Amino acid sequence: MKVAKFGGSSVADSTQLHKVAEIIQNDPERKFIVVSAPGKRDKEDFKVTDMLIQLGNAYINGEDFNKYYSIVISRFKEIIEGLNIPYFILDEIEHNIHNILESDDTNKTKFDAIKAVGEDSSAKVLSAYLNSLGVKASYINPKDAGIMVSNEAGYAEILPESFQKIYTLRERDGILVIPGFFGYTKEGQLATFSRGGSDITGSIIAAGVKASLYENFTDVDSVYSVNPSYVENPNEIRTLTYREMRELSYAGFSVFHNEALIPAFKEQIPVCIKNTNNPLYPGTMIVAEKKPEEKCVVGIASDTGFCSLYVSKYFMNREIGFGRKLFNILEDEGISFEHAPSGIDDMSIIIRESQLTESKEKIILKRITDELHPQTVSLDRGLAMIMIVGEGLVRTVGLASRAATAISDANVNIEMINQGSSEVSMMFGVLSKDLDLAIPSLYKAFFG
Amino acid sequence: MKVAKFGGSSVADSTQLHKVAEIIQNDPERKFIVVSAPGKRDKEDFKVTDMLIQLGNAYINGEDFNKYYSIVISRFKEIIEGLNIPYFILDEIEHNIHNILESDDTNKTKFDAIKAVGEDSSAKVLSAYLNSLGVKASYINPKDAGIMVSNEAGYAEILPESFQKIYTLRERDGILVIPGFFGYTKEGQLATFSRGGSDITGSIIAAGVKASLYENFTDVDSVYSVNPSYVENPNEIRTLTYREMRELSYAGFSVFHNEALIPAFKEQIPVCIKNTNNPLYPGTMIVAEKKPEEKCVVGIASDTGFCSLYVSKYFMNREIGFGRKLFNILEDEGISFEHAPSGIDDMSIIIRESQLTESKEKIILKRITDELHPQTVSLDRGLAMIMIVGEGLVRTVGLASRAATAISDANVNIEMINQGSSEVSMMFGVLSKDLDLAIPSLYKAFFG
């Protein structure tokens, strides 16, 4: 049995939903279907979820929300007419919104429930459409599916006990269409995952029903070995390991929500990224293990918005506990670090700039000065991290030199190299402004 | 006023002491002379301090120590006869040893005092010899010189209050000959520095008297840019900064005892390494600042005996406090780390193998497993660290690539790169067995 998840662009309008229905019918193994809210139909278009957020905010602020309400409804009206399915689905959607707003729940809970209307409605629409085609399918509410989550609206996390209940879905008849993005707390309250959470739902269902494959239908033919904004039609990746995917998506690869795949990974379920508009195309497989001969660099990812906290002190490395004290200060201040290369008398800690407000920076620098008495302490912003990712990379002679040479050939200075800590990646720090020089040069070196 | 320190080979016999006396007379600025114990005269020879250690051990174990005693005495007899200076010096040396052994001190204190007899006697001999040449010179006992140290026999550290007293030595008449390697506690007990401690004494005196120069006379013409055991007649270093020296001597450069220069550094006193057998040769200057045009790679150092503790855990970098907890365990177990490169889900901690007994290893791996619940934890031994050192190195485009390329050209795999944490060095981890391939290739790349 397979789980197929369809993203926002795949359910954006009736034309797309025709493709979805066809894809589902083309493989009897596709029993569990997870859907996002309707996304953009073109660059200028809006996402239904964004409209729902506007609606929610307007409602909470006591402003007129009808504008957004009617935009949402008319989008679904269009879809329902396009699919030529019974009109009562639209009534259901309208009632659903009214029930949420008129309930006695707190505004926070109402807001979260409104945000989830897009996915919920998509699921209702798709199952109705499948029925209209004579396919046995039913809408399954996440509560009914057994998706129990922690009580953190907007950041809910799956509760381990959910998976047993989800497994029983295998027994149900026909195709099950489940809305992505949300679950229910033990108290029965709706709570959404973080944004992009439909991937999480798909991954959770795949893990729960122990699917043979988790198909993630999106609008790209495959995962690319580098961000297409840096290189024209870059190389497509056929196979990725979970670890490679983790490192790539960490450093700005947007195919996936960073945590989304973890539940599937834990159950060793293979994942396939496919294109709804080109379903016969192989796409990209994400698997636990790779054949040795496939081992090499698969991708180059990069992300900006890092800063480097530099601390130097004579005989730091003789001072047992220095590292601990430094990390202690960061922990006290609620700062998590990304990497911490250290020398003999020096240590650099790479931190996401988003974590460091000006005031936070002052506090941390002061505490380090007062508590650790370093020779120097300073903070540099505007750093970018480049990740070169591939299984077996650490054991391949010459890769580091090829990478470093490519970067300096682009006449870019390497601010930092962190190699050997990870088994599957090498990290290079450069100034953000130099990324568009460094990345194409690296791509050429490894894929050109 | 200059401080000149003469090492073991410079005071090994009367021929060498002739050279020393000449060097001292050739520059009236050379007022403060610090001497080591007589060292080896040739490869097969013994060092007086080693014999004294044997003597001390034999005495403590109640064994016959006369064998070692007479070896020591006959060496000084030879020197005294060679220099043709009064015989009572030898009696003084003999009385000194007897007084130590017959005192009521603890064995620990006696042992430390015996260890120091070599330097103390050298100083007495040299001042007597200078006098015999008509040069006004006097032996200054470290207590009299004001060298007050912490009460840690064998690991004594200078007490800050010493320097004021030492400064008053400037007022004394003539040349002052001070034995290296030891000082006295507040209780008036003799205590030695760690081995190689004559460098420390010289550095302390230089700092105390605010010398214009600290000359360190040894048996090499200069500091070399790479260990001559890897490369034949390597490039000589004319000028080094303190920071460069620190990083070089850290990674196996044996010219200096790692901490020796710190007191001189703190007072910004320039240091010169010279050859007693070739005193007109410029040698190597060690200074606080360098001219920009001199900035580039000055040396390549390496050291073996490292191991890498590898820990991986999903979302390590999201887990605030993970690094702190890990360092906490190491601190509890009394382990200091050298470097700690970390990735997204991985962290490698480089530790000196000498710190990790098999049992210690077991304890640490178990604690990490039990307390941090990682996916993986492992320890790899047999690592070597290569340091490429030079001011301005981090800001020079292409150096990292040149280094990495040189290593892979030698067909050596790079286990680890740590660049950017230190301002003046890049660190590469390779397997110890590969050092003799990697180092010559790196030397060729930067100096060939």
Image (spheres, coloured by chain):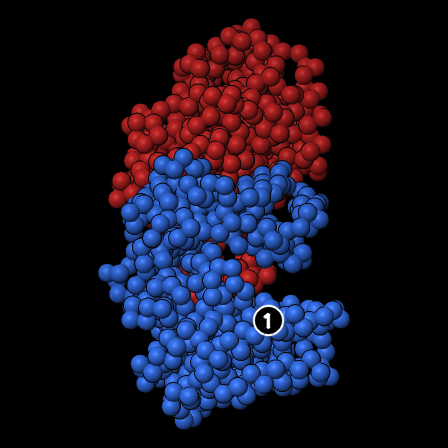
Chain colours: A red, B blue
The quarter holding residue B65 reads: bottom right
Say which quadrant the N terminus of chain B sits in: bottom left
Q: Chain of mark 1?
A: B
Q: From the top left corner, tell me how far across and down residue B88 is, in percent.
A: 55, 88
Residue for point 48% across, 59% down:
B43
Q: From the top left corner, tell me how far across and down residue B135 is, in percent.
A: 38, 89
Residue for badge 1: B71
**Is A212 placed above or below B244 here?**
above
Q: How many marks?
A: 1
Q: Nearer the viewer, residue A39 or B120?
A: B120
Tell me the amino acid under the disc marked 1: Ile
Crowd around label 1: few <14 · some 14–19 · many ≥20 (10 Å): some
Q: From the top left corner, tell me how far across and down residue A318 is, in percent.
A: 55, 62
Q: Residue furthest right?
A: B62
Residue for point 56% across, 74% down:
B74
Q: Nearer the viewer, residue A405 or A124?
A: A405
